[in-house]
Image (cartoon, grey):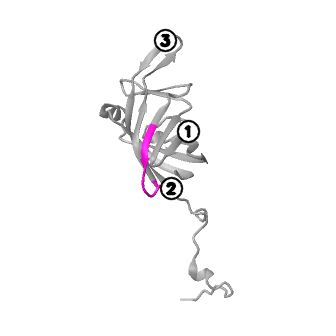
Amino acid sequence: MIAKGNWQGYYQFDNKRHESMRGHKHTYFGIAIVNIADNRFSGTVQDDLASGGTEGIGEITGTVDGDEVEFIKQMPVMTVLRADGTRQTFNKKHRKIYYAGKLSADGMSISGQWRFKFGFLWIGIIPIPMPPTSGTWTMTFKRISIFAHRKPINPTRHAYRHQPETTYAQ
């Protein structure tokens, strides 16, 4: 089963032209899996804007069957890469992105393929055809220590709490 918590990863396009137009080989993302019930899971996703990601916090819903993982990523805004390499954002949901991959034997990483289906972007009454697109992705589970927020302890100072600190003149 997939682990509840924080995952970090990246995706890339199969079409190298897309990568060169975007100026990034990988786009990094973070996923928080917050609900797991039977073989289903859901959570949130956020792309890294500095590496070419889409704005906003999206949603994921998926299933696990053995080591097979599938989920749909739905971002809150539509970002389109134009032929000249510029990006245009529209105030409408992004097309659904379909992810499929294999969970590693230790359950700590997943790698696979992602794809967009053919669709249309409607600008007013004008339909703009959006071709299918695909690529690869990978993500790793991030264990977070319950003590990560604390300052490190100085063992020599705290080992003998009953003794006051002593400063010696040089």
For this rendering, which residue is in front, 56 or 35? 35
Residue found at the very far top of the displayed protein: 125
Residue type for callout 3 = Ile
Task: State which tag comes first along the sequence, 2 or 1.
Answer: 1
Residue corresponding to mark 2 = 142
The amino acid type, in three-letter code, at marker 2 is Lys
Callout 1 amino acid:
Thr
In this image, 88 relative to 4: left or right?
Answer: left
**Closer to viewer: mark 2 or mark 1:** 1
Left or right, residue 98 beside residue 61:
left
Q: Is residue 128 magenta?
A: no
Residue 13 image point, x, y percent: 36, 36
Q: Residue furthest right?
A: 162
Q: Which of the marked residues, 1 or 3, is nearer the chain's N terminus?
A: 1
- Element assignment for label 3: strand
67 vs 57, nearest the viewer: 67
Q: Residue at x 52, y 42 (%)?
A: 63
**Which of pointers 2 and 3 lies earlier in the amino acid sequence?**
3
Q: Residue 162: where, in percent of width, then height?
A: 69, 87
Q: CA distance from mark 1 to mark 3?
A: 31 Å
Name above or below for residue 46 compared with residue 144.
above
Question: Which is more toward the observer, 169 or 52?
Answer: 52
Q: Residue at x 47, y 33 (%)?
A: 97
Q: Secondary structure at mark 1?
A: strand
Name the side, left or right, on which 56 lies relative to 127. right
Q: Which mark is residue 61?
A: 1
Report the residue marked by disc 3: 126
In front: label 2 or label 3? 2
Q: Could you tell me which secondary element the residue under label 2 belongs to?
A: strand
